[in-house]
Image (cartoon, rainbow, N blue to C red):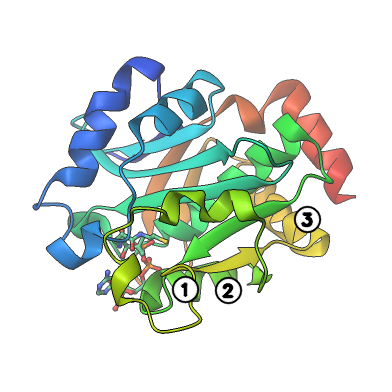
């Protein structure tokens, strides 16, 4: 089997990413509601090499995930993770949590807050986010609730709930743990995802894990 490749998306791949998210072959109707289609944010992230895709041997996108620099805050959001039905169960979301954490540390500095949002009914994503070390952030900054205005789910939210998602923050010790895991995984050219019962080879073609960035990440986890 040809391995999967995890790499930063190019800004000119945004349409392909949006198509990937919208495809019923990749995601069920309910699942698509968990991924906000944010072409502009995907493009901005891709311009900074902080939007990641996993592509199959045939060049098809099978997973996608980004780092979003939300206006008016000094917090960075990791979000937009989707793994195609055909490629679930290999731990790709976990790997993408490690990669994006390293991306934020390398690009925005180790003390930058990393946040994410998950719908509490999305048990698989919630499990991975908690496994990654994220902890509850009960009172998120207002800027993170702006996209809720006009959200079709808003009218049906229970009283007292301002957003359909719960928010989470990543403590520094957990950032270190995730970055360390990524560095260990990329000490050879081909990573084998072993946190699943279906091990799969993934080639990580990332500037993040080589050269100066790697040295910075190694200094961070020491
Ligand atoms: C959440 C998601 C990214 C997880 O994908 P993943 O990284 O492949 O998941 P894991 O490797 O952790 O899977 C662990 C187990 O859960 C199963 N699983 C994962 N997602 C599942 C889903 N949505 N429905 C049913 N089972 C699922 C896997 O098949 C695997 O089962 P196995 O151990 O019996 O083989 C993926 O389900 C997805 O893209 N969902 C739709 C979009 C979404 O919710 N994104 C997150 C927004 S916060």
Give the camera-side residue of 198 and 35: 35
Could you tell me which residue is drawn at 41 percent across and 48 percent down?
Answer: 80
Q: Secondary structure at mark 1?
A: helix
| One can see residue 196 in this view | no
Picture layout, residue 27 above or below residue 159 = above
Classify residue 67 as left or right of residue 139. Answer: left
Q: Residue at x 30, y 22 (%)?
A: 13
The residue wearing badge 1 is: 126
Q: Considering depth in this image, is 89 or 190 the residue closer to the camera?
A: 89
* Residue 167 rendering spot, x and y as whole percentages: 58, 66
- 114 lies left or right of 53: right
Furthest residue to the left? 25
Left or right placement of residue 26 versus residue 151 in this view: left
Does the beta carbon of the residue at mark 2 sit less than 8 Å from ligand 1? Answer: no
Q: Name, please, the residue furthest toward the bottom.
A: 159
Disc 1 and disc 3: Cα gap in Å?
Answer: 20 Å
> Which residue corresponds to mark 3?
176
Q: Which residue is mark 2?
A: 130
Q: Residues within 10 Å of mark 3 (few under 14, many from 20)?
A: many
Query: Is residue 200 at all visible to an observer of this figure?
Result: yes
Question: Are there few (<14), some (14-19), or many (20+) residues within 10 Å of tag 2?
Answer: few
CB atoms of marks 1 and 2 within 8 Å: yes
Disc nearer the start of the sequence (1/3): 1
């Amino acid at each position: 089997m040809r391995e999967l490749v995890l790499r930063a998306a190019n800004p000119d791949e945004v349409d392909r990413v949006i198509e990937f998210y919208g495809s019923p072959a990749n995601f069920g109707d309910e699942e698509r509601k968990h991924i906000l289609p944010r072409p502009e944010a995907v493009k901005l992230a891709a311009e900074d090499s902080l939007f990641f895709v996993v592509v199959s041997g045939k060049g098809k996108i099978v997973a996608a995930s980004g780092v979003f620099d939300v206006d008016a805050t000094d917090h960075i959001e990791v979000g937009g993770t989707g793994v195609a039905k055909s490629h679930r169960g290999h731990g790709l979301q976990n790997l993408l949590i490690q990669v994006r954490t390293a991306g934020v540390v390398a690009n925005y500095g180790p003390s930058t807050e990393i946040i994410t949002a998950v719908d509490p009914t999305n048990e698989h994503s919630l499990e991975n986010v908690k496994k990654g070390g994220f902890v509850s952030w009960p009172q998120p900054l207002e800027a993170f609730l702006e996209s809720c205005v006009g959200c079709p789910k808003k009218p049906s939210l229970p009283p007292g709930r301002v957003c359909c998602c719960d928010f989470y923050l990543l403590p520094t010790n957990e950032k270190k743990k995730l970055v360390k895991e990524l560095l260990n995984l990329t000490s050879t050219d081909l990573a084998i995802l072993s946190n699943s019962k279906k091990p799969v080879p993934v080639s990580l073609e990332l500037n993040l894990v080589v050269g100066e960035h790697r040295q910075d990440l190694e200094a961070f986890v020491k």
